[in-house]
Amino acid sequence: MMKASGVLRTAGLAALLAGVFSLMSCESASKAQSQMAFPPPPVSVVEVQAQDVPIYGEYAAQTFARDMVEVRGRVDGFIEKRLFQVGADVRAGETLYTLDLRPYAAEVDKAKGDLAKSEADLEFARKQVALIQAQANLSQAKANLVKAQQDVDRLQPLVKQEAAAKQDLDNALAALDANKANVAALSANVDQTRLQARTNIESAAAQVESNKALLRTAELNLNYATIKAPVSGRIGDSLIEVGGLVSKAAAQPLTTIVPLDPIWVRFKLSEAEYLTYRKLKGRQGNVGMPIQLVLADDSAFPHEGEIRNSLNQVDPKTGTLEIQGTFPNPEHTVLPGQFGRVRLRTREAKNVIVVPQRAVQQLQSMQSVFTVGPGNKAEARTIVTGDRVGDNWIVTQGLKPGDKVIVEGVQKVRPGAPVQPSPYKPDKPAEASIRGGQS
């Protein structure tokens, strides 16, 4: 019985060993089949190199219009036409409203008539008809005086010789005195008439200038009755419609025009950031510092702007200084009042390693990447990151120049497993340069 029991145990052990070897051979075959069925996963890698990287500061910003204009009436009148669409882009000089022109056209006609009359009066005054007549009378009186003097001179010797009556000499002397008096009176009259003529000419000339001014005023009022856009920009709603009365003394404007190109933006810097900004500005000189604008949907505004000015004091409540800049806005896509972020280059990191953000894995407080080592096998590396630059991270520890970092396909990689590396081709190669970074 004991011998039979030993035989059975030996047979059972042999069967167990046979089963174990069979299982091991099956597992080996399964591994072989698995390795044959699942080749190394393809991954995209980037070979990191030390480089100089610009660092950008990011600040909350809001757009605004520097030269918003309120369109107002300069004369009173009823609106006959409105020639713009609300919300349309208008150009400087474009007609917006037309008032009733008839009263102002009548004033222009009246002013033209008054000017013509005053010009005729001036022409008449310049001819000096009264002065010419007075001078002619004086000339006639002087001629009579000469004749009277000749009569006296002729009669005096005759009277001495008793060849003529003394009465005739007395009459001649009386006529001479009368002619002298007449010449003196007419001379005074000429002087007075000359002064009056000069006064009339100056008065008529002044009246002409006055009527010219009245005509210009009437023409201006007629021109103001056609209300035009003072600047180019986007026009708002019309607060007075066709048929409404426009008053030059009205409190509310007819509409508003907002210039959109360029568009202005304001943001605030802390005192420390302002000192850094002053240093950068000092190095750059008077050239406007370039800035980028990121809109509320995180899209990058395609046009680069520049800083134009800063306010003259730090806000004591917030300890910040407002900086203002402009952006070209030819498509008029950005409107005043929009919020976004301004990116300003603050410094440059020298000789640093940069990896794409998508290559970095975050596990609690630790960051790591996969690299491709010898034999194209994946290796896990713990890293320490610094500033973010666009879609990239600056790596301060854990990598060295020449390391091949896996960017795409990370989810299929296991430490020590082989991979099929290929060069990484970013979807937006210029994204970092367009959007800048954040410090």
Image (cartoon, rainbow, N blue to C red):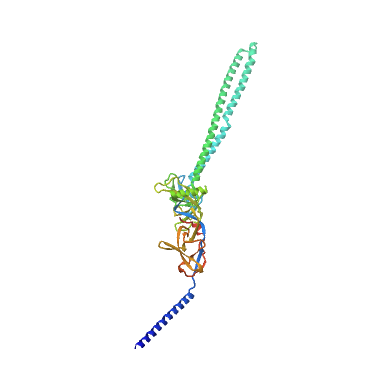
Q: Is residue 202 visible?
A: yes
**Residue at far front of view:** 3
Q: How many marks?
A: 0
Q: Nearer the viewer, residue 360 or 375?
A: 375
Q: Nearer the viewer, residue 413 or 320?
A: 413
**The C terminus is located in which quarter?**
bottom left
| Percent x, y of residue 331 | 50, 55
**Residue at far left of view:** 1
Please tell me in which quadrant of the rendered image residue 362 appears.
bottom left
| Percent x, y of residue 352 | 50, 57
Residue placed at 58% from the left, 30% from the top? Answer: 129
Q: Does 344 appear above or below 168?
A: below
Q: Does 135 appear above or below 292?
A: above
Is 178 left, or right, of 256 in this rendering? right
| Percent x, y of residue 96 | 48, 50
| Percent x, y of residue 140 | 61, 24
Q: Is residue 409 visible?
A: no
**The N terminus is located in which quarter?**
bottom left
Residue placed at 56% from the left, 24% from the top? Answer: 188
